[in-house]
Image (tube, rainbow, N blue to C red):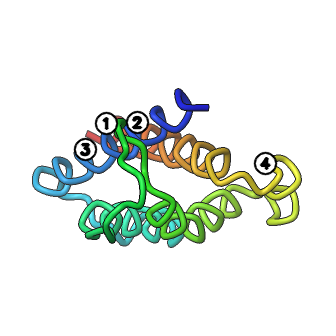
Amino acid sequence: MKKTILLVSFSLLAFLSCANESSATSTMPDVSKPEAVQKFNLAIKKVAMEKEPAPTTPRTSAELSDYKKEMLLPAAKDLIASSGVSYSEIERQTGGDREKILKWAVEVYGDYNKQTNKNYKSEN
């Protein structure tokens, strides 16, 4: 469980750092991205910039707090749903587990970015 949470945390950080890097060097407009990907990207940025209330228990890992997970959850569900999965199917497959939903959303987000980069490289 800790490995999954840690993986999601590092994945989000990696995507966030890549998003900042590509926005400075890329000439592709964000308008071409589906709305769900844009919402998830904005949610990641908002979570990264958000100051948390003082934690009730000290954390020793880079895992996201419950507060930040809740901030990401609606955009994560929308992103998964934009790939053709119904909301009820999301709940059925994950059992409502936030970590599973966030991990799934990061996978969809990564797949979309890989496809976008592949298409961009083939155009040039």
Q: Please say if 41 is above or below 117.
A: below
Tell which circle, 1 or 4, labels the residue nearer the N-terminal end: 4
Answer few, some or many: residues within 10 Å of disc 2's Cα (few below 14, many 20 plus, some between 14 and 19).
few
Tell which circle, 1 or 3, labels the residue nearer the N-terminal end: 3
The residues tagged by marks 1 and 3 sit, at their Cα atoms, a distance apart of 16 Å
Quarter of the rendering containing residue 75: bottom right
Marks 3/2 in contact by CB < 8 Å: the verdict is no
> Which residue bears the numbered disc 4?
94
User: Residue 43 in the image: x percent, y percent?
Assistant: 41, 68
Answer few, some or many: residues within 10 Å of disc 4's Cα (few below 14, many 20 plus, some between 14 and 19).
some
Quarter of the rendering containing residue 91: bottom right
> Which residue bears the numbered disc 2?
118
**Residue at the spot x=37%, y=44% of the render?**
59
Q: Residue furthest front?
A: 57
> Which residue bears the numbered disc 3?
18
Marks 2/1 in contact by CB < 8 Å: the verdict is yes
> Which residue bears the numbered disc 1?
121
